[in-house]
Amino acid sequence: MRSLKNGLFLLAFFLVSSLVSAQTSKIISGSTKFSVKFIMGTCNGTFAAPTGTAVFNEKNPENASFDIKIAANTFDTKSNTRDKDMKSDKYFYVEKHPNIHFKSSKVEKRGAKYQATGTLSIRDVSKTVTLPFEAKKNADGSYLLTSTFEVNRLDYKIGEKDWKLKDIVTVNLEATIK
């Protein structure tokens, strides 16, 4: 009888600790920056911080998941004319497609870093991508997740081929989850 109680206690402890380590977190802060080369140099800009949810624990990355959105209408390069044009139907078409969305389907640890594979949707195009990221646990138990990756804007109908503007956009994403 005593071994049965001990076994049940260990099973209950394991289940509770598994649930705690796979808790859903919200993105509480962050930033989204991008850069793209063009004929005059490099255009740098931002979007608002990402929003959404995450399940992450460095001890169980295979159980992690991310559902992240970035408001496309927050595109900002400090040039009102360019920003208005980029929000139009020629580029992001924010009126019809208000969010850039990433939803993971698999997360893996690769050396000291991680990678999340999932669906990236921009405009009306959805593609499977793998995004590398790093995770740093903060003293308060939150995580700082950072990712730098490249996107070919033409794959998502962001403008057309143009000799004045490069196709590859570099994105730097930061999110603190808690």
Image: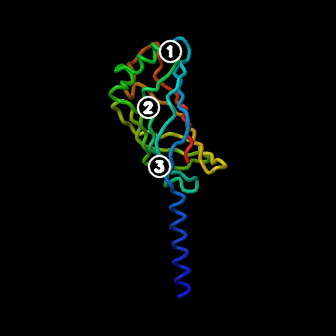
Kind of residue indicated by mark 2: Ala
Residue 33, position as x, y percentages in the image: 54, 28
Instruction: Check disc 2 and report the residue beneath it.
Output: 71
The mark lying in front, picked from 3 and 1, is: 1
Instruction: Check disc 3 and report the residue beneath it.
Output: 65
Q: Residues within 10 Å of mark 1 (few under 14, many from 20)?
A: few
Q: CA distance from mark 3 to mark 2?
A: 20 Å
Residue 173 picture quarter: top right
Identify the coloring: rainbow
Kind of residue indicated by mark 1: Ser
Left or right: residue 13 compared with residue 126: right
Tell which residue pokes out farthest to the top in this image.
Answer: 40
Between 113 and 43, the one lying in front of the other is 43
Residue 177, position as x, y percentages in the image: 55, 45
- Helix, strand or loop at disc 3? strand
Q: Residues within 10 Å of mark 2 (few under 14, many from 20)?
A: some
- Helix, strand or loop at disc 2? strand
- Helix, strand or loop at disc 1? loop
The mark lying in front, picked from 3 and 2, is: 2
Residue 136, position as x, y percentages in the image: 62, 45
Kind of residue indicated by mark 3: Ser
Residue at horizontal 54 percent and vertical 58 percent from the top: 21
